[in-house]
Image (spheres, rainbow, N blue to C red):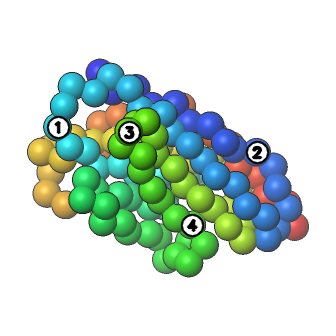
């Protein structure tokens, strides 16, 4: 059972930066598609960024050029570097993982099997 634990959320002013981290454990081998998602109460969850096993990344249009997803396979950590944060980025951010064999392609539209508990990001103007 894969377990995901996010950290790094907090409160920043508009234009500030945060780096979210997700510690993954419980691997039994194989390759995974990893992603970051966010959700605001009363709204649908939004895919922010994903990264495949070969390092290919995809981003939501709203964060392109500001956010960067990366992976440290040695320490089993997933990161989301968020720069030039804006109030509309305020949300609960979730880390997710899905075994690559379950579906073709690594994108935010696939159904992810494993989810973290989330970390809150609040951006004030």
Task: Say which element carries label 3.
Answer: loop
Q: CA distance from mark 2 to mark 4?
A: 16 Å
Q: Residues within 10 Å of mark 4 (few under 14, many from 20)?
A: many
Quadrant where the N terminus lies? top left
The disc at residue 72 is none
Give the image location of residue 121, x and y in percent: 70, 49
* CA neighbours of label 2 inside 10 A, class few (<14), some (14 to 19), many (20+): some
Residue 30 is tagged as 1
Per the image, label 1 sits on a secondary structure element best described as loop
Residue that numbered label 4 is attached to: 67
- Position of the C terminus, as image quadrant, is bottom right
> Mark 1 or mark 2, which is nearer the start of the sequence?
2
* Mark closer to the observer (4, 3): 3
**Cα–Cα gap, marks 4 and 1:** 27 Å
What's the mark number on residue 10? 2
- Of discs 3 and 2, which sits in the foreground? 3
Disc nearest the viewer among 2 and 1: 1
Q: Residue at x 45, y 56 (%)?
A: 70
Looking at marks 2 and 4 on the same chain, the residue that comes earlier in the sequence is marked by 2
């Amino acid at each position: 059972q894969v377990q995901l634990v996010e950290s790094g959320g907090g409160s920043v002013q508009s234009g500030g930066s945060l780096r979210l981290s997700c510690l993954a454990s419980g691997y039994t081998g194989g390759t995974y598609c990893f992603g970051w998602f966010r959700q605001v109460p009363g709204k649908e969850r939004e895919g922010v960024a994903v990264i495949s096993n070969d390092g290919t990344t995809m981003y939501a249009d709203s964060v392109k050029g500001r956010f960067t997803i990366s992976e440290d396979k040695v320490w089993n950590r997933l990161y989301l570097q968020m720069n030039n944060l804006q109030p509309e980025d305020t949300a609960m951010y979730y880390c997710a993982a899905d075994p690559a064999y379950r579906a073709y392609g690594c994108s935010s539209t696939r159904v992810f099997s494993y989810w973290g508990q989330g970390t809150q990001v609040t951006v004030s103007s």
